[in-house]
Image (cartoon, rainbow, N blue to C red):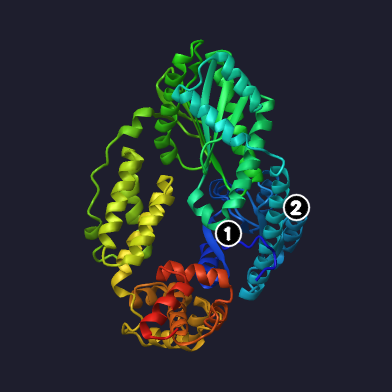
Amino acid sequence: MSNNPVVLDKIRCIVVDDEALIRERFRYAFPLEEHGFEIIGEAEDGEEALELCRQLSPDIVITDVVMPGMNGLELTGQLKQLLPRIKVIILSSFQEFEFARKAVALGALGYLLKVTSGYQELLEILDQARSEIEADRERMLLSIEERKQLQDSQPLLRKQLILDIRSGMAHSPARLGAACDFVNWHRPGPVFTLGLVSIDRYSSLSQTFHSKDLALFKYVMMRMIEELAETSLPCNVFDWDEQSIGLWILLQDPGDAAQVSPLCESILHHARKYLPFTVSVRVSRAHRMEASPEGWPSAFGSAFGDLEELKAALFYEGHGSYHAYNAVHGTVQGKEPGTALVAAAASRHSMPELPDPAERLAGLSDPAGLQRLVHDDYIRPLVSAKPEPERLLHWMEELAGRWTAADSHSRSRFLAGIGGVETIHDAEEFLLSLFLWKQSASRLAFDQPVQRAEIQKALDYVARHYREPLSVADISDYTAISPNYFSHLFKAQTGINFSDYVTRYRIERSKQYLRETEMQVGEIAEQIGIPDYKYFARIFRRLVGKTPSQYREEEGGRSGRK
């Protein structure tokens, strides 16, 4: 384990190669998740990879050198310029060594030889990348904390001032001006817009970062927005909620609203470049700040209503985007490159008629077919109809609750996961995970008999070697079956993929140790082949529904052993 105080539970990686077999090797042949690395995306060339990096905000990019379109050298240069915090690892053939050397000179962390490099070499360079990422974030957090200590209670006072205006508690222009002076804000002008800058995937980030660290990141983002606004428009920035920062943008004329777009696009760009997450921005119509205070609550209420309507556009367009409510045309204007105008009424559409998931799952066992089913039969109709996000989330919640009614742990996990669904892409991932669970829920017992001797041989091998690193490549060599065919055969015989089986087997053995021995939890983690204590504890809680210590206390009490 790292001695660095900034220890990340999971490092997010993207693999870039025009050969599908190479990409599959990283995803299926190496047990990267056991060491805290997650493959979150794949790309066939540099252009696709660059767009994925903008959308998914990975920590590491593993890329081939020679590819059609944008090659690995060009991708490395683009990432160094646009997203410098991302670490790049180069895949190279012997004849491409000079290209790899140039990529390292451009800022790549190092390189691996495609043909001869094995799992250990990959793990070593990934661990090096992890150390650099953690060190970068530690320096960032220390710098942020030093600056934050200089601040006083202004964020709370600023938010309260907005709430007072909205509720009619601001009684005169003079008192409002004095309050703005007190919190070091610009005094209001004749016209304003309201905006919200929201951290994308906040639910997931809150599991990776401590709440204190997220608060520090938000502080940096607020200061960054204030500095950007100094050169464009008067903008009063305030802390709105744990996920969002509010903008009170002051204008002299409704026509000045066109100047808001460059500011918001600059916020998106700087967040991608300097922060370990992306943000999305919503901006209301331009509203008049009437001379009489009686009109202020209505104007602010209408502006907040605009922002609420923009939620649907954000849900279906995805993270890292900017959406402005156009008062003249009554439309939601998407400002992400390539996004067309979207009708504001989209947020009021009803749920489309969707096929019965249980019927569609019947007889379907191919994972790729299941992925196509989710996308074609559910996501496409939803994107076309654009129902209210709340209606879609309610449908997903009902489906998950109905399917997991007999499994309290899975029920809690899926219902909690609804809170992390912020876009249609998140909804697709949730449904795919739920459908996979439903498909294999009745076939998860470890004593389930198998019909193929090769698979029984593999299960026996796991039982003897579960304390050691295990991969599909290792077990396919042992059983004399190709990795792809072994993966297919194992899933068909057991109902789950090989890496999930190994993880579940290890957790079952850890439960036995917790019940029957006095070993420390960290010792048990090492004993079962998961030496990273934090990763073991997180996996145990996800699969069992409680921490190892809670499980030991409850099961020890039932057996009469303490």
Q: Residue at x 58, y 54 (%)?
A: 58
| Quadrant in the picture for the N terminus | bottom right
Task: Locate residue 80, reporting x and y percent.
Answer: 70, 48
The residue lying at 36 percent from left, 51 percent from top is 375
Q: Secondary structure at mark 1?
A: strand
Relative to 165, does residue 148 appear above or below in the rendering?
Answer: below
Say whether residue 479 is visible: no
Identify the mark nearer the N-term, 1 or 2. Answer: 1
145 sits to left or right of 546: right
Q: Position of residue 107 (x, y in %)?
A: 74, 54
Mark 1 neighbour density, 10 Å: few (under 14) some (14–19) many (20 or more): many
Name the kind of residue labelled 1 in the image: Cys
Could you say where residue 20 lies in the image, as x and y percent from the top left?
51, 62
Mark 2: few/some/many CA within 10 Å (<14, 14-19, 20+): some
Find numbered disc 2 in the image and state the secondary structure of the residue it sits on. helix
Determine which residue is flagged by label 1.
Answer: 13
Residue 380: horizontal and vertical position, in percent? 34, 45
In screen coordinates, is 444 left or right of 122? left
Which of the two discs, 1 and 2, sits closer to the camera? Answer: 1
> Pointer 2: what residue?
106
